[in-house]
Image: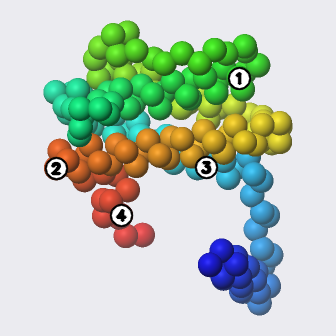
Amino acid sequence: MLMQRVAVGVAFFGLLAAGYAQEGGSAPAPRTVAQVLAEGWDEVGHKIVEMAREFPEDKYNFKPAPEVRTFAEQLLHAATGTVYLAKIAHGEKAKYAELQREKYPTKADIVAVLKQAFDDVSSVLKAEGDEQAKARPGLWIGLLEHVGEHYGQLVVYYRLNGIVPPESRPKPKS
């Protein structure tokens, strides 16, 4: 299955490049790993911050089952990993410490720390992305996967509260 996907991808990009050549143009320069990471990071970060902003504050303590985190705790957990990584990326000695709900009692508090954390990581990736991507590829890919998983979990909170998540909304026609 994986080999089929790779073959389809290679064929697609080959056709794309051939189309550019026929039009007399040149294929665009390939994006760097850091650019791909930064784009993925910005995309998922934007969706999570958007979700934090629009989810009703009176539902921030909602949890789909007693043994799981509340919506607010999910956001703070995603922010925790992001803050931790931002510190490491800035060359600081970092200790993983879960951001606690008591310190962030309001929706505005949570949105602010979440947005700041995503912005910090984004700025590092854009400023020194290639160096960072080469130095710690597993860390960056792991964090991207981690926040993607939390986006998926937040979708459940949205759906159970009758809200359509950002990725499921109709896209404007271009």
Pointer 3: what residue?
39
Looking at the picture, which amino acid does disc 1 mark?
Ile
The image position of residue 58, as x and y in percent, is 16, 27
**Residue depicted at x 74% and y 46%:** 34
Figure check: 7 above or below 123: below
Q: Name the N-terminal-most of marks 1 and 2.
A: 1
The one nearer the camera, 143 or 32, is 143
Label 3, label 4: how many angstroms apart (C-alpha)? 19 Å
Q: On the image, numbered disc 4 is attached to which residue? A: 171
Distance from label 1 to label 3 (Cα)? 20 Å
From the image, state whether disc 2 or disc 3 is nearer to you: 2
Q: Amino acid at mark 4?
A: Lys
Position of the N terminus, as image quadrant, is bottom right
- Which structural element holds mark 1? helix
Specify whether 75 is left or right of 87.
left
Crowd band around label 3 with a 10 angstrom C-alpha radius: few (<14), some (14–19), many (20+) = some
Any part of residue 78 in sight:
yes
Residue 81's place in the image compared with 160, above or below, is above
Mark 3 secondary-structure assignment? helix
Residue 86: x %, y % from top left: 64, 25
Please, what is the three-letter code of the amino acid marked with disc 2? Gly
**Residue sitting nearer the eye, 98 or 171:** 98
Quadrant in which residue 49 is drawn: top left
Outermost residue toward the front in this view? 67
Residue 147 shown left or right of residue 155 in the figure: right
Query: Which mark identifies residue 88?
Result: 1
Labelled disc at residue 162 = 2
